Structures are given as C-alpha cells and as structure tokens.
Amino acid sequence: MKRRGKAALCLGMTGVMAVGTMLSGCGKEQTNGKVKIEVVQYKPEAVDVFEELEKKFNETHDNIELVIDSPNDAMTILKTRFIREDYPDIIGIGGDVNYSNFLDSDMLMDISDFDGLDDIKEAYLETDKELEYVPMDGVYAMPYMANAAGVLYNKDMFEEHGWTIPTTWDEFTALCERIEAEGIQPLYFGFKDSWTCLAPWNAIAVDLAPSDVCSEVNKGNTTFTDNYREVAEKEKALLAYAQDNPAAYGYNDACTAFAKGESAMFVIGSYAVPQIKSVNPDMNIDSFVFPASNNAEENVLNSGNDLQFSIMKNCEHKEEAYEVLRFFMEDENVQSYIDDQSAVPCEKGDFELPSMLDGMKEYINEGKLVDYQDHHYPSEMSVDAMIQTYLLDDSENATDKFLKKFDTEWVRYNRDLIQKVQDYEKENGSNN
C-alpha cells in the first residue's frame, strides 16, 4: 500500500522546529541499567494523575524507568519530533484525525499480540478501525479513556418541576417548550467559541447520519448534502430554546450560566463538568443521551476515544512498552484516572463512574455508542466555524448553502485522501 511521507504530517511546522529538542529520544538504555520508556501524552489537564502513575510505576519496577511528558502543546511537539525522527516510545493521543494521519504515515506499531486488548471494549476498538483511511490489518492503539457527549441537566431543577427525561426528538422539543413556559431558559450555548458548535452537531449526528459517512464520501458513494440535512436543521432548531444571541457568549459564559441555574440544560460533553463545578461545586448534574431521532431505539451515545496509547513502530523495547500499557490498565490506575478526569473507561470492568454519567451508564455498559463525527474532519477545514456561520445565517436557503459548502470544502481539503481511497477501492474492490 502506498503511503504518504512523514513530512506530510508537519507542513507549516518549521517555525517550531526548536521544540523538538525539548524531549529525549526513544528507548535508550540508561547508565543505571534500566530501560527507559518515554511516553508523551497530549492531555496537560491530566498531568497530576500521570505524575502519580509515573512515580508508582518506577517504585514498583526495577528494570524499567518510565518517563511521562505532558506538555501543553503535545501535538505540535510530537509532529516536530517526527520530522526530526526523534520518537518517544509511546504516544497518548485522541482517537481523531491526528491518529489517522500518524497511522497512514506508517509510524505506529501493530500491537495485535498485546494481551491487554482482550480487556478493551469492542466498541472502542471498532471506533479506531473506522479512523483508518483505508482498511488495515492489525491494531495500532490501545483505547484507554473515552468521554461522552449529550445533554447535561440540572437534576435538582428537574426533580423540583417534575420534568421527565425525553427519549425522542418530539419529546425533547416538548420538554423545552414546557420549561420555557415555566419561565426558565431551556438551553444555554457558548457559540462565540466556535468549537462548541460541534457539541450538539456530534450528538445529533450519531443518531441521524451513518458513522462511516466520511469514508463513504471519500469513496464517492454519497455526499454530505444527502446525509447532513436533518442534522443541520435540528441544530439550528435548538436556537429557539437558547438565550438571545448565543454567539455573543463563550464556553466559559455558558458553563457559568448553567452552573448558576440560568438554564435547565446544556448540550455539551462530560468534559465540561469540571469547569461547571469550579463555579458551583455543589451542583447536582446528571446527563442523558441526545434524542435526535423520533425512534427511541435509534438513540446512541456520542462517545469517542479521548485518550489512547500507541507504540511507535521503531520502538526498540516492545516488551517493556507492553509492560507500561499493562500497568496503565491495572484497575486501581484506571479508577484513579476516572476519578481525576471524570472519564469513561474503555476497559471492561466494574469501575465507579462519575455520578453525572448516571443517565448514560446503560449505553456505556452496553457499548451502544458511536464516535464523534468531527474526529474525521481535517482541522484545516474549520467545520466548527462553518457551523457557526450557518447558525447565524437567517436566509431562506441557509441550509442548502451550508451543505453545498460542506461538500465543496471537503473535496478541497481531502483531495489527495479521496484519490488514495478511490485508488484502493479500484485495486481491492469495495467489499474490503
């Protein structure tokens, strides 16, 4: 299979080349006789829990020295290091387009023989397979933690007013109207920060659009116009239940407003809870899966791999790297991360989940979940800004314009990938 060169990952990175010298190289023997395993993970907000894991590992392993780096701009640092061919042993990144690009550049090790994969929920392994541009044999990441997106709600407010959790779109809009009739703001958005426009988009799309729509578009089998019309229309319909001019308020504004009881619900991911509770630590928050369909059976949880570990292909100490992954997977360490980050474990087991996920536990336990659509979007396409512009467009043909632009921009930013996928389809047939 023909692959793009590593340098293709790092266009425009020349201004930060010096960053690559900040971190050390791959799998080097130390003078103390231990094998050094370096992990670079991309979640700086989790630095405290990883510092504890590093300390605990090194206190219990005589033959391996674990070094975990959690830089603020990990993806920039990683891409710069890759240009220099200065690789860590293990990278901890999200299950998104960056993973797709690293995999496509033949940089990651096939870890199919890693015994810990048997303990990972199949749904999260399948999520990674959908991120492959073309089908590949093997497994190239160990999903570790996921997050969940849907609707956060003020549980005390719901109980006080006797509101029930909706399971269909019609029930959801009827609930919004009832809340509004009782003098309370149903929803609050922070669309000034355009990335927040993707939260309802993803939560709606998992119910209404195929999970492989991006792949099918690349193959030439469909268009976004054919798949995203209802998604777009329903996100715009939410504006009727939001505060005036939601594009004037940012993410922090929305978190603060929800925390202060200025809205009954907030369409956002579980990642927002720490910010909300920094304003109101005692707030009783629960959540439910966004009911975008009028068939309750079609509801699925919007959940993706928030943190997964891949071993670099040229790592010199595979077995020691595997030992690090096994350590991360120990129940006590998984629970520590869950408690610190309010995360969803990708590992099977009887873990204690944050209470604000109570309304989603059934979907989590059953693996009834679908990845975020935007994990497949190239960042250069700025889909969040496109959605933001669409939501502000009151013209009669706004939806048509938006969908046409989505299709046009997709081809513009994925031309080489589309050609690669279609060449693969011609060579291998469409059933592969």
Image (tube, rainbow, N blue to C red):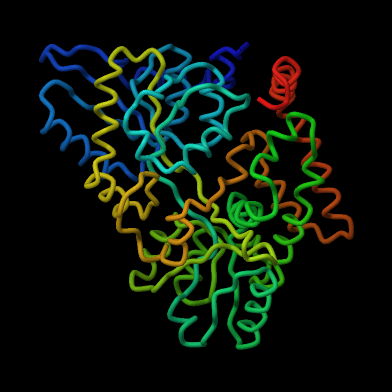
Between residue 297 and residue 100, name the one nearer to us. Answer: 297
Q: Is residue 109 left or right of residue 104?
A: left
Q: Is residue 193 left or right of residue 87?
A: right
**Residue at point 65% right, 55% down?**
207
Between residue 396 and residue 154, name the one nearer to us. Answer: 154
Q: Is residue 428 above or below residue 299?
A: above
Q: Is residue 106 above or below residue 394?
A: above
Q: Quadrant of the C terminus?
A: top right
Q: Is residue 380 left or right of residue 310?
A: right
**Residue at point 60% right, 75% down?**
186
Could you tell me residue 327's position as x and y percent?
Answer: 23, 35
Count every numbered label the image shows and give the total.
0
Q: Is residue 154 left or right of residue 204?
A: left
Could you tell me residue 427's position as x and y percent?
Answer: 72, 14
Q: Would residue 263 be visible to someone looking at this image?
A: no
Between residue 310 and residue 1, name the one nearer to us. Answer: 1
Could you tell me residue 230's position as x and y percent?
Answer: 76, 57
**Residue at point 79% right, 30% down?**
220
User: Residue lying farthest front?
Assistant: 431
Q: Quadrant of the N terminus?
A: top right
